[in-house]
Amino acid sequence: MSKTYAPHADMAANAHITAADYEEMYNASIADPEAFWGEHGKRIDWIKPYSRVKDVCFDYGNVSIKWYDDGTLNVAANCIDRHLATRGDQTAIIWEPDSPDDDALHISYRDLHKATCKMANVLKGLGVEKGDRVVIYMPMIPEATYAMLACARIGAIHSIVFAGFSPDALSARVNGCNAKVVITADEAPRGGRNTPLKTNADKALAKCDDSVQALVVRRTGADVPWSDRDHDYNALAAAASDDCPPTEVNAEDPLFILYTSGSTGQPKGVVHTTGGYLVYAAMTHQITFDYHDGDIYWCTADVGWVTGHSYIVYGPLANGATTVMFEGVPTYPDASRFWQVCEKHKVSQFYTAPTAIRALMGQGDDFVKKADLSSLKLLGTVGEPINPEAWNWYNDVVGGGRCPIVDTWWQTETGGHLMTPLPGAHATKPGAAQKPFFGIEPVVLDPTDGSVIDGNDVEGVLCIKDSWPGQMRTVWGDHERFEQTYFSDFKGYYFTGDGCRRDADGDYWITGRVDDVINVSGHRMGTAEVESALVAHPKVAEAAVVGYPHDIKGQGIYCYVTLMSGDEPSEDLRKELRTWVRNEIGPIASPDLIQWAPGLPKTRSGKIMRRILRKIAEDDFGALGDTSTLADPSVVDELIANRMNKG
Ligand code: WTA
């Protein structure tokens, strides 16, 4: 039995949801989703109220997901305008710059309204209309949020590309959604170094249609190359009106596209729509973090990931919260930065990834202890399973044993939290995502035949039985791929791609991906993407990529590479391949270990047996299983003999 931590009495006394509330509301949400979500849809303002709540079909071949589909609204009006009367002067965004020597900004809801309207008018001036796509490739600066909300305000669909992605990755996404405009900045300061964002965008745009325009925000003021397609955001915004009426859109009009990795092929454009997404982001933000008026909430994610969308911008702002936006990194100028920022801005709720916790834990407790963290009330984690050692350190050293930890399990596809303990309701268990959120019915299936595994103390693949308002609706431009990816393996369910265990108490533990997706420092990556980057190198004949356990990153990237005949392995070539992959995808995809493989284990029909490669990378030779179907079993011995050392 693992140790549990009961809700703290003062937290439970004031919490939005107590243990009794949870039971009652959860049961109601499953018994009558229409009634439950019909009521909670009223959390946001509608221009035309909905009369229909849910219209969903999970049958493979006919998958269709609609929520509130005869209602109309505007997301920016919900995140800004409706707060102006009551909290116009309240800080909406606290922006903390990369360098602690530069001033933080406190942006009020009134300021946010003006800035968003200006950005919206600038976009309109560039010809952006409702339904058009706008790619955002930006540092973590307030203008990134203005850009998101400006798109929402005029009904344009944004697609954010993480600023750490390479020009090639950016051009693929711009072309993938036929964006009209790319919003970028001159440079992106991070950890004391400036990434030449505009130069990267230029390289990407060279591979896009000439009609694609660039809107360039001045962040550092550096001299950057300029061409006919470029527009100076600061000059245009200075001249633009700060009034822009919100465009009425349908609940099922797309709000954004976010490219994410899957087990096969190139990243797919996850489509989230307007009404259901906002209801779900707002509700989960309020309840999971037990957000109350006056709290200062900080999520350390980047807006380039879904966590930044739902829990820096849309959820908090829909709730009229004060949300912190941080441009920098946890270890600059030193490993106490996160805690200094918590002290400086009196942060109440702090939400980060296990990889950051592990990295900071390794730097020792003094960096934490020199900051006054008495404002903290709650801690959260997201992105990957958290090991109990990191959980305990987070709890004891950062939270001082006072702050409940919410371990939130969810995905780009889910829009918001699907499983998490609630801080005033549940005794937490280190490492468990534990309880389904309202309306979420998890099912554990047998991976071999898809049958439902009932009862407790069981393990299998994790599916979800019915829809929730924040669920993705389709893959941009490829509904068939959507159905194939999520609804074809286990008919009638949404397949998450994760494995899970339901323990003796009925609590859920996520055991990790069961497909060829790996999770490196909380960044999701398809092994197929890294493989296709490797084989694009002229000296590489074949490559197979798997994850292996890594102390800080959670998983590291292990590559087996077969060279073209005539090409010799060398340390220089290893370095070259690393740089190559960084250039193709971005630094987050940089291979940790590259093993030269004269041959790869294949079946007689030519299929690479990744199961075996995974076991070798994991150092788990005893569990290789049946190798008799291999065309040439001797390659396995060769690979084991030359396995890369993790050290
Ligand atoms: C993993 C991030 C364990 C999981 C919001 C999922 C987690 C993938 C947790 C989605 C958690 C996320 N515990 N595993 N609390 N949160 N994951 O799309 O494998 O970047 O499928 O969304 O991260 O990653 P994504």
Image (cartoon, rainbow, N blue to C red):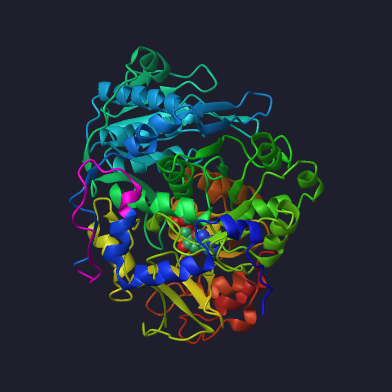
Position of 193 with respect to 541 (left or right) is: right
For residue 50: magenta? yes
Q: Nearer the viewer, residue 21 or 170?
A: 21
For residue 345: magenta? no
Q: Is residue 541 visible in this depiction of the protein? A: no
Q: Nearer the viewer, residue 290 or 437?
A: 290
Q: Image quarter for residue 284?
A: bottom left
Q: Position of residue 305 (x, y in %)?
A: 46, 47
Q: Position of residue 578 (x, y in %)?
A: 57, 48
Task: Tell me what residue is drawn at x 26 percent, y 36 percent.
Answer: 155
Principal SS element in the magenta part?
Answer: loop
Q: Position of residue 524 (x, y in %)?
A: 49, 55
Of the 4 image quadrants, the one containing the N terminus is bottom right
Q: Nearer the viewer, residue 78 or 622?
A: 78
Exactly how many numbered labels are in the figure? Answer: 0
Task: Tell me what residue is drawn at x 29 percent, y 47 percent.
Answer: 274
Q: Position of residue 226 (x, y in %)?
A: 41, 18
* Rendered view: 165 above or below 99: below
Q: Image quarter for residue 78?
A: top left
Of the 4 image quadrants, the one containing the C terminus is bottom right
Q: Is residue 449 visible in this depiction of the protein? A: yes
Position of 73 with respect to 104 (left or right) is: left
* Rendered view: 66 above or below 28: above
* Rendered view: 573 above or below 30: above
Task: Tell me what residue is drawn at x 57 percent, y 81 percent.
Answer: 624
Please state the extent of the stretch shown in magenta in the rendering: 41-61
Q: Residue furthest front?
A: 13
Q: Nearer the viewer, residue 435 or 508?
A: 435
